[in-house]
Each structure stands twice: as structure tokens, then as C-alpha cells.
Amino acid sequence: MEKTLLKNFDVPHSGNIDVYIAHGGYQAVNKALINFKPKQIIELIKNSGLRGRGGAGFPTGLKWELMPDDPDVTKYLVVNTDEGEPGTFKDRYLVEKDPHQVLEGVIITAYAVGAHRAFVYIRGEFFSGAKNWIKVIADAYERGFLGENILGTKFNLDVSVHRGAGAYICGEETALLESLEGKRGIPRLKPPYPSKVGLWAQPTLVHNVETLACVPHIILKGSEWFANIGTKESKGPKIFCVSGHVEKPGNYELPMGTTLREIIYEHAGGIKNGRKIKAIIPGGASTPMLTPEHLDVPMAFESLPKVGSMLGTGAVIVMDDNTCIVNAVTHLAKFFAHESCGKCAPCRIGTRTMMKLLGKIEAGKGRDEDIDLLLDLANSLRGTTFCPLGEASTNPVISSIKYFRDEYEYHIKKKQCMTTEVPISDKPESVAKILVVDDDPDFVEITRFILESNNYKVIGASNGSEGIAKAKEEEPDLIISDIMMSSVLDGLDMSWKMQEDEKLKHIPIIMVTSIANTDYASLFPTDQYIHVDEFLFKPVPPDKLLDAVKRMLSSKVSV
Amino acid sequence: MDYVAKQLSIPLKDVYSTASFYSLFRMKPAGEYVIQVCEGLSCFLNGGAERLVDYLSKKLGIKVGETTPDGKFTLEVVQCLASCGTSPTMRINDELYENLTKEKVNNILEQLVGENANGKNIIKEL
């Protein structure tokens, strides 16, 4: 498909107003302000079928129509650049790479609804985006696209930038308005909707960046062009943000209704390292996850609910078959617990309790009944909060239990991830392998139990020669060995032999002994034949053992 | 906060309530460079947050939320930075760093330390 929204992304310096105008910029503003009356523009947008791109998908034309058309009422337009939905990175790119396109949308929208004051609310974290907005607005003032009597018409518009201070909830329109007024960003009760009572109690229109970016193109190419792209209820081009385990993550502009299969395999290059898909989140962290059987579902407002999910922001997060679902969902639960504003008790307490329960299951401390408890808790959050955050936080939990209940059960019963048992040949950072050598089978078994409960792989050997043979065969990341063994080769002999072998000499060794009255560390400080990294004394407390193991393995940290 | 409350003639509790609500407002001084590692889902899937934080905290000798004794670096974990396509990601002050690898992190830290030679001893060789 011909790129529309992303057409200037490859143009160098497209944020420069001269470059932008040279590529056909500000023609839409010209056409809209000179050739159209505000009512005609609203009609045009209604006919185009444009729906909000921020997640809710409310019809844009209808939203505009809901604004009072009394010219004496002060009306505001707010640009929501508070993009923070995990998986979504389209608005930041639009503002960084083609900000004038969005500003054109702002000017035309303000003209259509009769707003003379617009505010850009941008996430505090988007520093370069905020800088861009300020520059772009200043340039537009200079060229007469903003200010008084724009392009010689009677239309006036002032735009200013307001930086947020770090709160995901401020992407919700009423919380954003509270924040813009200088208060805590907590959502308001709806109704009244912002179109009646918004910023400083005046009618206010709040729009997502991508929605506004669509507006100039509809003005230039017509509502029919827009309505001919996409599906019955979802029109126009859409930016899909693809991330996670794909070969080519990025923003892809495609018609509404493109299937997940086409997005993932044709555009994003398929799954990394040729692996298989386990789960897909189709519209950002707030939307329920899907499985490979849903790959042929069109990405549209009307088709995703049929399979129990939502289009959301169109942010596709792909997880391969090596992903631990419990771990991933625990991450999301942490996000929602962190970002819950605390206003509604079900969300404030619910998100935290879900996070704790998931954390418990993830750490192998879950109980059988915890899965149903999670479901019960999640269901109690639905429909009981002011804003959609509470309900959104339950989506990953409920959907993952629906499709991957076996993984939760595995975590609870076996106290480890299902995925660590899948042989991972193409991933270098697999579980650490530890060789335990002792002629006392009890010590080997106890150590094996401690290490395996902490997700290490353990190989046992009963004497020095067997230790060397196993080390050659298995190439462990660490060796834990007894010093005195009733065999031909004891621990120190084994270490000595290993120093002569190129492959084995770099493996760290922890020596364990029950003879605690000897200062072994000072006995072999710089011995060039015997190589020992650490001494531990029996009985070894589990935490001491794990500490030493972690310390020894940490030299292999890879990022 | 006292000053703001007086200037705006609003109760101190309202100022405190607002200041404590947002993650970018701080109640105690931070280091010269605030390192914020993204722990969003996409960064996590691409080996971000956990390993990156571990690595940084070993290298700087501080835990998440702490500042190095010389006041140079503060290590924080933050939610999605909207760079999911170029994960793992971190932000240092107002600069965004994407597609991070161990080498890149080392270079970035060296560059920042290079601006002030006194800070060199705090970065451990790993």
C-alpha cells in the first residue's frame, strides 16, 4: 500500500517547515480553511468513517458533532501525546519524524469545531518530542499557519505545549485534563463527557496524535478515498507497531483489516531465529492475548472482539514458544499496579493483589487454588472502576489463564517454568549447568535439590575421574567438588588435571570440605597447578551455596 | 513545596499530593545522570530490564533507586518508554538509548564518565 501517514518518514529533515512544504505540506490547511466551511469538514470526516486511534475507536466525526456549535462558547482542543501503552510507539515517531503533519490535523480540527486554543499534552519522558513540538509550533506561527487571521481568514488559533510528569493514567482523557489543570492525574466521572464539560469546565475535544494525522489526508484526498481502505466498520490506513520476538520490529502502515499473519510474517519478517509463535497481544498491553490459531483474524475494530480481544492501539506484541507466559503476565501486572492512580479501590487493591499472586506463582510458591482466585479477583475488577485501566489490567490475566492454564499449573506443581524444559539450541543464554562431584551421594542429591529448585541444571559425579569425564562431555558452567574423596583422584587432583586441559581450565570451581579447621584459602593462594575459586565448609547452608553459585556465574553475565 | 503552596494559596497537602503522584517529580536529590531502564513487556521479551538492570547495578555498585556515592549516577526502572521496536531501551536524563547491547552500555557509561574524570573509579570492570 502507498504510504500516507508515514510518507515523510524517509525524507531527511521532514520536521523542517521548508522541507515539509516542499513535499506538499500545508496544502490541506489551505484547502480546508479557504474552500470549506467548518460544517462541511465535519461532514467530510463523518463520511470518511475515521475512528479514534488511541484505543477506544470512537467515531471522530461524531465526537466533533457533539461539541456545541455556539461560537460564543470557549472551546479547547487537546492533543494527547501521552503515549505509554506498552507495545505502542507510533505517536512518538509521528511527532519526532513528521510533526507538521500532526499540526496540520490540529489546525483543521480546531477550525472545524471552532476552538481557538489548543494544548499539546506530551509525556514528560518524550524530551525530543517536546522540543520538536515547540519548534514546529514556533515555525508555524512565523509562517502564519498559527496566530491571528490564519491564511487571511477570520480564524485564530493559539497552540502551546504542556509536558507531563510521568503517569500512564494521564493518557486517559479526563485524567489528562486534570493533569493539564495542574492537579493529580486522576480520571473524572463520565458523563459529563469532555465535549460538554472538559478543560476548565469548557467543552473540550481530546484526540490521539495518529487520529489528527489522518485528518489532513482526508481533506486532500477526500472521504471516499479513506472509506475505500479497510473493512466495513474500520476505515483507512493504520499504523501497526510490531515488537517482541520478530525479525524486523517497527511501525508498519497498512490498511485496517490486515491480518495478523500478514503483519507478522510479510512485514515484520516473521519470528526471530525461526521459532514458533506462542502468543500475540494485538493492541497493546491492555488487550487480551491471542494464540497462533487467531493469526488470520483481520486487525479491525469489529473483528477482534469476535475472538475475545480488541484492536486497542494496534500495537502487536509477539511472544515466541520460548516465552514463559506466567513471567510475561507478571510483568504486565506489575505495570498496571504501578500505574493505577489509586482513585478506585477495586483497581488500587486489585492490581496490587494480582501482581502479588502472580509473583508468588512465578516464584514457584503458588497454591493450586491461586489460579481461580486470580480469575475471581480479575472478574471483580471489571466494570467497577471509573476508567478503563482497572478492566485493562485484567485482560492479560484472564486471557492468559484461558489459553495457558497449563503453564500456571506447571509453575505451581513443578515450581519452575514450563519453557526451561524446552531444549533451547539456538539461544546461548540457557540455564546454567553445574557439575557436583562428591563420593557422598547424599551431598550430591541435597545440592542437586537446592540448585534445581533455583532453576539450575545439575550433573552429578561420585569421584574425580568421573568428574573430569562428565566435565568434558557436558561442559558445565561451574563445578562444585568435595576435596577429600575415597577415590584415585580427589578434588584437588581433579582441579590440577583440569588445569592441563584447554577446554576445562576456565571453568570456575567451588571446593567443599567438612574439615573446617584448615585455612584452605591461604594454603592455595596462588598455586599455579591447582585452581580453586572459592571454599565452602560443610554443612553448607543453602543461601550460602546459592550466593556463591551466583557470584561465580555472574562473571558470565550477558546483556 | 511550602513555597509553591504559599504562592498559589493552596493547602500544602494538595501540593504534596500532586508532587508525589507523578514519577518524574523527586522528593530527594538524584545523581547527575539518572539512568532509567525500561521494563516494558517488549524490552523484557528482548532481554531488557532484568538483565540490563543487573548488569548496570553490578557495574555501578548500586541497587535500583540508589545513587552512586559520588552523586554521578542514579539507577531507576521505569515503565514503557514507547521504543518497543528498538528494545531494550534506557533513558539517561533526556537522551534515549535504543537497541542496547553490553558493548553499547559500556560505551555510553564510559562517555559519561569521560566528561568528569573523577567518576572513573566507580565503574567496575566486569
Image (cartoon, rainbow, N blue to C red):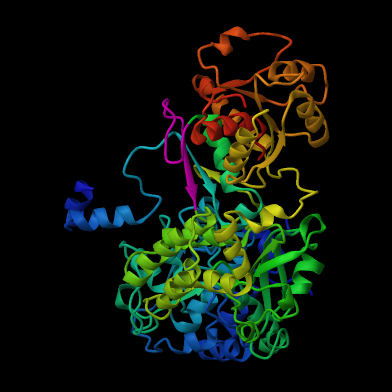
Is A320 contained in the magenta span?
A: no
Report the side of A517 relative to A26 (left or right).
left
Which residue appears farthest toward the front when viewing the image?
Answer: A486
| Image x and y of residue B55, in percent | 58, 36
Q: Using the rendered image of the protein, determine whether residue A165 is visible from the camera's viewpoint.
A: yes
**Residue A62, placed above or below residue A510:** below
Residue for point 31% across, 61% down: A182
**Residue A546, placed above or below residue A176:** above
| Image x and y of residue A218, in percent | 65, 81
Residue for point 71% across, 19% down: A490
Q: Quadrant of residue A510?
A: top right
Q: Which residues are magenta?
A: B62-78
Q: Say which quadrant the N terminus of chain A sits in.
A: bottom right
Look at the magenta stretch and give its main secondary structure. Answer: loop
Task: Give the number of callouts.
Answer: 0
Q: Say which quadrant the C terminus of chain A sits in.
A: top right
| Image x and y of residue A313, in percent | 59, 72
